[in-house]
Structure formats: C-alpha cells, structure tokens
Image: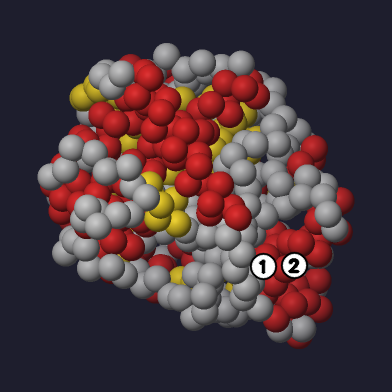
C-alpha cells in the first residue's frame, strides 16, 4: 500500500514538492526559487520553462528525501499561483512569451477600455471585477501583442492556461489540457454557477474558446505523470489554486470558517457554503469541488503585498540582509513611532480595487529609524487584513470567532500577535504549516481513497500556537483610523501610467 501523497506547490517565488503521510505529516521536501523578471515598471514575468525544470527537480528531491519511489506515492496534487498566465504552442509545448504574473499591471489601459466606466460588468457572472489581477486580460494582451497568435489560438494551435494547466500539460507529456474550478474562477472567464466558460465573458475580453482548458473538479484523476521524473506513472488527482488549497488544508469546510495565508501577498478566504455571495468589495470565488459533489464557495480578500514588502526592504532598500531579520529589527522599537506604510506596489486590491494607488510612507520625522519602517511594513499586512475582515462582516454578516493562519510570515510572532490585536479575535497556527501543499495533497488523496472524506482531513488538523488579543481596543481604533488616513494618501497620488 502506498505510504504517501505528493503535492507540487508552484508559488510566486519558488517551486516545491512535499510528500505527506496519511496523518498529514511531512515526509520529504524539495524546493527551488525561480527568477522574478521586471522588464518595465509594473511588469512582472516568470520563465515558464524555468518553472517546469524546477518542478521536475524538486519532485526528485522530495522523493529522495523521503527515501521513497513512485510505488510509495498514491497520487499527486498540484497547487499554484492562480492568475499568472501562460500561452504555449500545442505542437511544440513551447511558451510563446514569458508568463505574466498575477501582480503585473500592464493591462491597466486594456481593463479600462473593457470596463467602459463599469468595472463590474462581469461581476454577476464571474464574481470578479475587471482588474489587471486576473488572467483573462493578460491572455488578451498577449494575443494583441503578437497579432499572428489570434488566428492560431482560434484554431486551437495556441493554448491558454494558468500555471496549473501549464504544468499539467508538461508533466503529462502534452496529454491533458485541464484546469479546476478554483483556478478557472480566477480568470474572469468562468460562470460561477455553471462552472464552465462564459461565452459573454469570452466575447467581451476577446478570448477564443478553442485555446482554453477543460474545467474539471478539484479532486479526480486527470491523468498520469509522464515527465521523466521520479513520479512517472503516478496519477495526477488534485488541483487547487493556492489560496483555496490553503483553505482546504486548514479544514475550513463549514460556512463561516476562515483562513489567512501570508505569502508574497496575503489572502483571506471565508467559506460561505453552497451559494455564492455577491460583493463589490470582495471576490466571490469557488472554494473547492470534490468530484461530482456540488461546489463550495468562498469570499476572498486579496492583498497584493505582504511578504513582498519584506523582500522590498531587503532587496530595494537594504534595510535587512535576509527576510528572517525583519522581526528582530521591528521588535527593537516598541511601536512604529506613528509611521504607516501602505505598500501599494501593484495598486490596492480588496476592498478598494484601485490599480492607480501608489505606495506611501506617512508620518516620517527625524526620530524615524529603519526599525520603525520595518515594523510599519509588518503592521501594514495586519491592517489590510483587518479591512478585509471588516468587509466580510459587512457583506456576509459573518463574524469569525478566530482566524486560522498559515504561510511563511506566520513564524513572525510579532506580526501574529499584532494581527490578533487589530482583529480582536485569536489567530491560530496549525502544527503543519505547509497548508497550501497539504490541501492539494488532500484533494488528490481523496480522489484515490487515501482519505475517505473531508472528516478525515478535519481529524488530521492540529493546533500549534494561538495568539489572543492583548491591545486596548481604543488604541487599536486610533491606530486604525491613522492607517486609513495613510491609505487615502496612496489613493490620491497621481502617477503616469506605464504604456
């Protein structure tokens, strides 16, 4: 009997593969970073071939670290950065351009043209506003940038996919062109209720249906790996966008349960059950679908910059030498000295959806040090999360009793305590921090019978650390008001739009 389920976790900054046992414990891991390419201001790209090469390498590393082989692995699940967009040649498997990353804002003018004064033109169908964030406009930009591609796309010779579809095509040797409902729900092209591509959305954005993958559930057997890796022959049986995978890995199966993932960006998802809830401030998205079961939906608040802000302190300002130094630097001062950072490097996402917002640092005096700025950068993640949870309460009437947290930044105890303080509810970290990969593994394992139901997943979940609110409520509200003042400054800044 197979001992493990594998998860390929293709994130914004790295590729990872993790083998989990039946209790959800990590048995082996492989990880490699890939380059972040910024050819122009506001543009962010990845090399799709570098990603594929790294995925193949980390699969082999994880299997070796576990002392396993393909016969020990029951299934493979994939989770991925969601809105990042790739176009490739069906015949050769070669990408026609670098992947355009979800943070990229080059489609701002195109989005404005498509919106024609109404960013919500497709919200009733897709649950999403027209925004540079999503995949559909990115694919349209690629088709417009090379006019020869459109005719080939209409003939099905050029394929479109988010990173899950790109990897699946490559890892199955070009045998399977699919995506799941969670990733499809991030394209601006899928009908949330029909769980298939919307012709109205395709027509508005200008995407040929022939280039699109088939939309499938999040947990079923799609094919077998055939990529020359240590897991060739193992069934690929789970697909979840990264944030939905984290929701699944955190066992948030009951309406009202919420998780927040602190990675490159920050993403709060709340399970809303069997019916999608409309919102102008938040995203309505598919949480997961298991086989032929009805889907579960979620409200999501997406924050563009969280860990990316720490990397900016490291790489652009040289304030820290490595990301793990930021907590000690921030903790060297008792507060921010009334300094507030709004890291709107790619505009502001939920709840404002303003592509034109620009980053600001407010409140600097001669007293301000790099420690104050570092602390303000960390606190910005918590304040943005507060704004999102406030919107959830307003839209859905859901008041969460606690917030489950995961992602790399949850090792920062200063941030986690401050998050509990500003929310007024506990933040709770699980024993297995790799919840994104774990969610993909659970989806794959459920499809092949390693776990029998989501109840088995819930039984595996264990609490590792809990932070209770400690800050005086009046002080929280005073600081929150100052934070909102800083955000207004970022919204009022006028900057030329890159062409």
- Total tally of numbered discs in the picture: 2
| 48 lies left or right of 178 | left
From the viewer's side, name the closer residue of 171 and 497.
Answer: 497
Instruction: For label 1, count other residues whose C-alpha is less than 10 Å away and answer few (under 14), some (14-19) or many (20+).
Output: many
Residue 107, label in figure: 1
Residues at discs 1 and 2 in contact (Cβ within 8 Å): yes
Quadrant in which the C terminus is drawn? bottom right
The residue that appears at 70% across and 81% down in the rendered structure is 145
The residue that appears at 62% across and 60% down in the rendered structure is 356
Q: Picture coordinates of residue 345 (x, y %)?
A: 48, 60
| 468 lies left or right of 274 | left
Instruction: For label 2, count other residues whose C-alpha is less than 10 Å away and answer few (under 14), some (14-19) or many (20+).
Output: some
Q: Is residue 40 visible?
A: yes
From the viewer's side, name the closer residue of 155 and 87.
Answer: 87
Q: Picture coordinates of residue 389 (x, y %)?
A: 50, 28
Q: Quadrant of residue 455?
A: top left
The residue that appears at 33% across and 36% down in the rendered structure is 406
Q: CA distance from mark 1 to mark 2?
A: 5 Å
Q: Picture coordinates of residue 216 (x, y %)?
A: 64, 43
Q: Picture coordinates of residue 156 (x, y %)?
A: 75, 70
Q: Is residue 449 visible?
A: no
Vertical side of 334 occupied by 87: above or below: below
Quadrant in which the N terminus is drawn? top left
Query: Which element carries disc 2, helix, strand or loop?
Result: helix
Vertical side of 400 occupied by 366: above or below: below
The residue that appears at 81% across and 60% down in the rendered structure is 114
Q: Write down the residue under mark 2.
A: 110
């Amino acid at each position: 009997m197979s001992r493990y389920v594998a998860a390929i976790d293709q994130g914004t900054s790295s590729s990872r593969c993790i083998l989990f046992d039946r209790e959800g414990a990590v048995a082996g891991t492989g990880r490699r970073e890939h380059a972040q390419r910024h050819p122009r201001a506001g543009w962010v790209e990845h090399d799709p071939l570098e990603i594929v090469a790294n995925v193949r390498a980390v699969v082999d590393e994880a299997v070796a670290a576990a002392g396993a082989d393909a016969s020990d692995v029951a299934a493979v699940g994939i989770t991925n950065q969601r809105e990042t967009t790739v176009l490739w040649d069906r015949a050769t498997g070669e990408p026609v351009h670098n992947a355009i990353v979800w943070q990229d804002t080059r489609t701002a003018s195109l989005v404005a043209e498509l919106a024609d004064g109404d960013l919500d033109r497709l919200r009733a169908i897709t649950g999403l506003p027209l925004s540079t964030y999503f995949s559909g406009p990115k694919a349209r930009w690629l088709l417009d940038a090379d006019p020869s591609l459109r005719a080939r796309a209409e003939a099905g010779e050029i394929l479109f996919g988010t990173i899950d579809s790109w990897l699946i095509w490559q890892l199955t040797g070009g045998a399977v062109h699919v995506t799941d409902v969670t990733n499809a729900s991030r394209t601006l092209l899928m009908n949330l209720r029909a769980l298939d591509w919307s012709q109205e959305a395709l027509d508005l954005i200008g995407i040929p249906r022939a280039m699109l993958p088939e939309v499938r559930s999040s947990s079923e057997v799609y094919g077998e790996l055939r990529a020359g890796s240590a897991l060739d022959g193992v069934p690929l049986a789970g697909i979840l966008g990264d944030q939905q995978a984290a929701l699944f890995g955190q066992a948030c199966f009951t309406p009202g349960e919420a998780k927040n993932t602190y990675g490159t960006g920050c993403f709060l998802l709340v399970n809303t059950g069997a019916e999608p809830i409309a919102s102008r401030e938040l995203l309505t998205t598919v949480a997961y679908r298991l086989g032929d079961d009805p889907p579960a939906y979620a409200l999501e608040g997406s924050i563009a910059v969280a860990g990316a802000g720490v990397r900016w302190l490291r790489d652009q300002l040289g304030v820290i030498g490595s990301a793990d130094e930021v907590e000690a630097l921030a903790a060297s001062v008792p507060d921010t000295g009334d300094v507030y950072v709004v890291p709107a490097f790619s505009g502001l996402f939920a709840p404002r959806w303003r592509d034109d917002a620009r980053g600001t640092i407010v409140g600097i005096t001669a007293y301000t040090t790099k420690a104050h700025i570092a602390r303000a950068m960390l606190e910005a993640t918590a304040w943005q999360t507060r704004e999102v949870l406030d919107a959830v309460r307003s839209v859905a009437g859901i008041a969460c009793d606690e917030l489950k947290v995961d992602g790399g930044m949850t090792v920062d105890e200063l941030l986690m305590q401050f998050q509990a303080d500003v929310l007024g509810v506990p933040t709770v970290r699980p024993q297995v921090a790799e919840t994104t990969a774990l969610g993909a593994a659970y989806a794959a394992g459920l499809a092949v019978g390693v776990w029998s139901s989501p109840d088995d997943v819930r039984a595996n979940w264990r609490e590792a650390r809990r932070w209770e609110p400690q800050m005086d409520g009046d002080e929280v509200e005073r600081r929150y008001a100052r934070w909102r003042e800083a955000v207004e400054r970022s919204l009022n800044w006028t900057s030329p739009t890159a062409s």
